[in-house]
Amino acid sequence: MQLHKGNHMKRTALLCAMLVFAGAAHAEDGFSASVGADYSTGDYGTDTTTKIFSVPVTARFNDGNWRYKASLPWMRVEGDPNVVPGLGSLDNLNPRGRGRGGIGGGEPTATETGSASGIGDLRLAATYSFDTGRALGIDVTGNAKIATADEDKGLGTGANDYGIALDLYRDFGGTLLFGGAGYTLLGDSDYIEVDSVLNANFGATRRVGRGSLGAMYDWREAASDAADDRSEITGFYSFPTGDRTKMQVYGFTGLSDGSPDVGAGINLTAAF
């Protein structure tokens, strides 16, 4: 399942329990909206700690086997200008990058830390859930990242990305096992060159009372030679807070320099 990362977007999400159970149960048609808060910190293999805080606002629409999603975060990033949310440490040659204060197209200044805030990248996704007639569920998702984040503030790359993902899941007596893989065509900007990447994940979630408790492992190929692969583990708990509302809390830890060291978040969703 794909996580929403706003970021670190992950959590761009929020999380897989919400998406998996929606697909497995063919969630009720209609509109839902959510708002969350996500915080992460890590050095990403640099000498500077980078802190990322995001508040993603997400809208979803279910129509039969189709699910549509749009998400836009507000973000604040403090740290190395070479660390780009969602991608980790890259060669960011933008002289106006976070904390650099350069003008025009010259070389970056020596300052290698700073803070910036603003709107992040817009993320769009469309998912089709196949009715296999069996216990196995299959989702295919097409997604796009529209570069609405300010690249001069280091909130994004300044280029659009496009991807596709395949997710499988199956319920075993209240325990849902899931896994997926995807490919993302990352776009180059005037200052950042990146490679297209593969990603994969697997995990499980178990119904506990009225809620669900789970964990997942997520891996993503490095976006450039200057970065390391992302590798992290997330634990989460999702539970209803009303007849048409639910909340999710989660925490995660990185297993490589490509991921933040630690992070946590919360998300509230309401159906209409």
Image (spheres, rainbow, N blue to C red):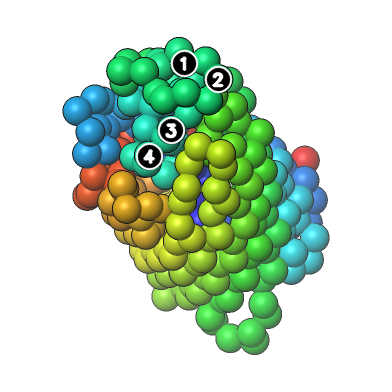
Q: Secondary structure at mark 4?
A: loop
Q: Which mark, residue 104?
A: 2
Q: Residues within 10 Å of mark 3 (few under 14, many from 20)?
A: some
Tell me the mark number nearer the camera, choosing from 2 and 3.
Answer: 2
| Percent x, y of residue 61 | 76, 51
Q: Which residue is mark 4?
A: 91
| Percent x, y of residue 250 | 38, 40
Task: Please report the residue visible at 60 percent of the width from the left and 43 percent of the height from the top.
Answer: 159
Tell me the mark number nearer the camera, choosing from 2 and 4.
Answer: 2
Under mark 2, the amino acid is: Gly
Q: Residues within 10 Å of mark 2 (few under 14, many from 20)?
A: few
For the residue pair 251 and 258, the one nearer the viewer reads as 258
Q: Which residue is mark 1?
A: 102
Tell me the mark number nearer the camera, choosing from 1 and 4.
Answer: 1
Q: Secondary structure at mark 1?
A: loop
Q: Which mark, residue 93?
A: 3
Q: Residues within 10 Å of mark 4 (few under 14, many from 20)?
A: some
Task: Please report the residue visible at 34 percent of the width from the left and 40 percent of the height from the top.
Answer: 89
Question: Residue pushed farthest front?
Answer: 106
Under mark 4, the amino acid is: Asp
Q: Secondary structure at mark 3?
A: loop
In the drawing, does residue 272 fall left or right of residue 266? Answer: right
Q: Residues within 10 Å of mark 1 (few under 14, many from 20)?
A: some
Query: Looking at the picture, does residue 59 appear above or below residue 66?
Result: above
Quadrant (top left/top right/bottom left/bottom right) for the C terminus: top right
In the drawing, does residue 125 fall left or right of residue 54? Answer: right
State if disc 1 and disc 2 touch (CB < 8 Å): yes
